[in-house]
Amino acid sequence: MRRVIAAVAALAMLALTGAAPAPATAGKSNPAADLKAFQDYFKTSFPKVPFDDFVNGPYAVNKGMRAQWEQIMQFPPYDFELADGKKLFETKFANGKSYGDCFPDKGIGIAQTYPHFDAKTGQVVTLVDAINACRVTNGEAKLDVSKGPMAEIAAYMVSTSHGKRFDVTIPDDPRALAAYEAGKQFFYSRRGQLNFSCASCHVQSAGKRLRGDIIAPALGLVAAFPIYRDAWGNIGTLGRRFVECNAQVRAVAFKPDSTIYHDLEYFLTYMDNGLPVTGPGTRP
Amino acid sequence: MKGSEIMRRRVASGAVAAPLPSALLCLVLGLGLACGFAGAARAAGTQAGYDAAIKAAEAAEHQAGLTHDQWTPTVEALKAAHAAAAAKDFAKATELAQHAEALAQLSIAQAQSEQTAWHSAVLR
């Protein structure tokens, strides 16, 4: 039995590698070159889409959806949660401090720099992490990182960065580069029983239809987060969406605040550098 | 809609650019049974047979976890195997455990192949 399985697996893998030959060996990490190639690919593939419009995901590449969306946006479905987020953000902790005390510029207009690499801990810190770290520092319990108050607070903070452009930095530190490379590898690696990578859908099939959805191009993929999704009925974080996109290819998803998703967010947000911050967004 | 249906649709509609070799389709659909595992002798219905099969399956799934590539159908097959064993249907339980092991092996092979194959997908 074992041998049969191994043989079939080997065969399948042969077919796989046969279809995608000559894997170049990993060169030196060069995020800036990756970024240029990544953005150029989408600019060339969607010549009619203005650069800034990539933040609008499926609406940027599908006219019908865009018309519907413009209707919806007359009364954005996230307005209540955004208002709640502002309230929560401004509410003092038991010790009298508030979120603003944990961030530069009192937390206003800074979301475009996340995730950032913390040279002290050697960790990638997402905005969601920073919000939870702030709570812990001030003696409060951590929040669920997928939805609810966390998504609302993050939505408010992101909204104060409107008009700014993503400006994620990958310092020349081997730990930062390793995190970036791990995120990049995850993005391009096929996984799950359906054998899809993130790139299979969001690069190769960008703009195409999958069930009722139009697949958003990978450029701008994270620029509108947190998002209100009709399918969720509320606002959710990027981690929540990563879990779904992993599960739909029949891969066991990771925890929304796992290291690998942090690395993935680091890579993807860096790829969005130069695009305007637009969250919270709304999606079907 | 089930994932395999999505895949079939995508293949039919040409949404997937690359042609899928049949062996890959086996992997993709992961229907171990459809890919020839069914030919392996029908499992004997003993507790001992099941114990050996589930041990092998769980070891393989653990290995898949170390490669950060577990599949949800493997998890489901393991769960179903445990349930069948609890109901003392060892023939069914053994078969499910063997199916789970087959899926876990495929996920390990996928992860190993992707260790290098992903490079060729990078936009450059």
Image: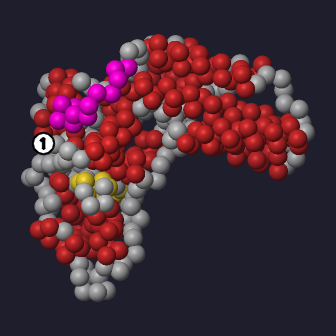
- SS label for mark 1: loop
Position of residue A253 measured from the top left corner of the image (x, y, whole percent): 49, 46
- Front one among A276 and A65: A276
Position of residue A269 measured from the top left corner of the image (x, y, whole percent): 24, 45
Position of residue A122 measured from the top left corner of the image (x, y, whole percent): 30, 55
Residue under the image location 49 percent in, 18 percent down: A16
When asked about the image quadrant of residue A1, the answer is top right
When asked about the image quadrant of residue A119, the answer is bottom left
Would you say the magenta stretch is mainly helix, strand or loop?
A: loop
- Front one among A106 and A263: A263
Whether A251 is drawn above or below A131: the answer is above
Q: Is any atom of residue A222 visible in this view?
A: no
**Badge 1: how crowded within 10 Å, few (<14), some, or many (20+)?**
some
- Front one among A242 and A232: A242
**Region rendered in magenta:** A23-34
Return the residue found at the far bottom: A95
In the image, what residue type sits under mark 1? Answer: Gly
Quadrant the C terminus of chain A occupies: top left
